[in-house]
Amino acid sequence: MSKSALITGITGQDGSYLAEHLVSLGYEVHGLIRGQNNPRAAIVRRIVPALQLVEGDLHDQSSLISALEATHPDEVYNLGAISFVALSFKQAINTGEITGLGVTRMLDAIRVVNPAIRFYQASSSEMFGKVRETPQTELTPFHPRSPYGVAKVYGHYITVNYRESYGMFAVSGILFNHESPRRGLEFVTRKITDGVARIKLGLETELRLGNIDSQRDWGFAGDYVRAMHLMLQQDEPDDYVVATGETHSVRELLELAFGHVGLRWQDHVVVDDRFLRPADVAMLVGDAGKAQRLLGWKPTVAFPELVAMMVESDLSAVAADRAPSSASRH
Amino acid sequence: MPELSRRALVTGVTGQDGSYLCELLLAEGYEVHGMVMPGELIPTTVPAAVHLHEGLLTDSGSLQAALDAARPDEVYNLAAATSVAASFDDPVAVADVTGLGVLRLLQAIRGTGAPIRLLQASSAEIFGGAEKSPQDETTPLCPISPYGVAKAFAHQTVQLHRRTHAVFAATAILYNHESPRRGPGFVTRKITTAAARISRGLDGELRLGNLDVERDWGYAPDYVRAMHLALQQETADDYVVATGETHPLRELLDIAFTSVGLDWHRHVVADPALLRPAEPVRLCGDASRARARLGWAPTRDFPAIIREMVMADLDRLDEGGHPPGAGPAGPSPDSPPRPAGMRRSVP
């Protein structure tokens, strides 16, 4: 009998990649979707036609219980969150509610409905914030610098707590930044590749950015969802860092993205203090040694390849958008 | 001309710490306001001079209203779902009050535009599973109960507001602190009440969960003094408030039962049903920072605290009053207190 999975945050980047991956492995895949006529439902349906959507909201525990009862999953992947760090400063309570307490609501719903369901929590390198050691491992202390980071730390601890106190198979995957052509436009990588495409195609001339010296460990989202699945196939639940182990600066990203279309970033990028976020995180780089050893996981897409993939995709999307007869983007 | 008196708003005013803190602030000349839950019974330990306002940490509007009414210079956030054991039954509600509640309070404080100082009562439970002992302000957090996880959220939220929003927000990381006003659901009070009752022939035995725990137990009136001092500094910071000594539960039993001429071994029954899913094994705090910067030091040692608690429980029995919540199992400290010793008065 095929396995069944329920994914929250299905309309996000990782949701669609994970759904595709699980469908390819023969899973029956359900996506939790919020609200009536969610416009993003159609997008994810187009990407993963086999996906079945079920209504529910991380704000509302009884809706999660109903969703679990309706879908009978073997595995739950909690990717739902208010995931944009800058927004979390403006909507701190909402971030705490969804990104933090949403985890507890789902864990508790699982405990009530069927504690044998395996649970994956999407934790984040933002939990490390002002890092205490480099690179960061599963044992590095957390020092979050944003409401998003604080809420993710809460989600991580409560996941560990349900595992240790209730014996549930609950794991936390500490994922470093991971990007793709499906990344939201509010994230710096996609903002840059989209900007490059627009500048190349003559729609715009400049790109305004905050701190171009910040460094990140950027991987490919398609690789990272494989790690999520592997974590739930182990004999014992545990926490894993998922990262490339390499850092690159925004400056390097600019070189690669503009270089890919034969432009110089210095001619187009304007550094704008308004985009600096409070308490910007310094140097995040992950040591995924444990995931490599125990899960046999490793990344397959290198950074230059990732940037090229994103620029190409945005060139096609922007070009299609300009064509008068074409439908809307995506 | 005397200076206008300073004003303080205390949440969780009906708890052990709330009552001691109100007494201290009144003695210091403050105008003291207390926030209570709508319909909450007010114990007689809350001084009559305290102005009461209804409000809930789960309701941002009510926090704003309480701040508008009290116009405080200092806010002490002592309100929380305080039972670690009960936090396993409803982790979502605990996180809403104990965790998100602090965020709502900080936002309400920022919303006033006034330079209000906040003292957050953090808890040693944020270090629940710490590998290192004793713990200090730099020890990595390692909460192991839904209560501890929610307190960790609150603690980090306060630190974040201090750094990114320049709010004067301090935390006191409080280790266990006891007194005759400790709630009946806490193990110290459960033991002192049982020793008193058994000595008067009212009970025969005392059922307890894990007898092997060790705790760093201090005296509640000392701890509220540290909270007040933390807000009188130039800058806001985190302070561990602890004695630095741990005592095994067996020693507590020995002191309590011996003080009424009994041998605890003949009355205490270990009951696995009372075990918590996860128990911090050894929490011990290093209060060097509080001692150095706040000039703070504990004034009462462990045996004296326990004996005072037993004597107070005996007095309550002998006065014919019902010790609040006395009984072999002991209700959770969050359950409604008994009417005895209560007055009801919210404007």
Image (cartoon, coloured by chain):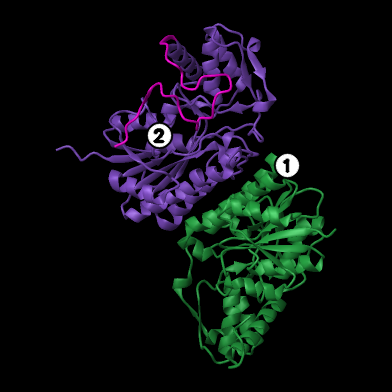
Chain colours: A green, B purple
Comparing B62 with B217, the one in front is B62
Residue B15 position in % (x across, y down) = 43, 31
- Residue B129, compared with residue B266, is above or below; it is below
Residue B148 position in % (x across, y down) = 57, 41
Type of residue at label 1?
Gly
Which disc number belongs to residue B40?
2
> Which quarter of the image is occupied by the N terminus of chain B?
top left
- Residue lying farthest to the left in this orientation: B1
Q: Which residue in the protein does label 1 denote?
A: A167
Quadrant housing residue B18: top left
Q: Say which of marks 1 and 2 sits in front.
A: 2
Which disc number belongs to residue B179?
none
Residue B191 position in % (x across, y down) = 56, 19
Residue at (80% x, 69% y) in the render: A24
Residue A279 in sight here? no
Magenta span contains residue A309: no
Q: Chain of mark 2?
A: B
Residue at (60% x, 72% y) in the render: A40
Cα–Cα gap, marks 1 and 2: 37 Å
Q: Chain of mark 1?
A: A
Residue B268 in sight here? yes
Estimate how packed mark 1 is, as few (under 14), some (14 to 19) or many (20 or more) residues with alpha carbons within 10 Å. some
Magenta span contains residue B322: yes
Residue A181 position in % (x across, y down) = 66, 77
Please report the bounds of the magenta region as a residue range.
B318-347
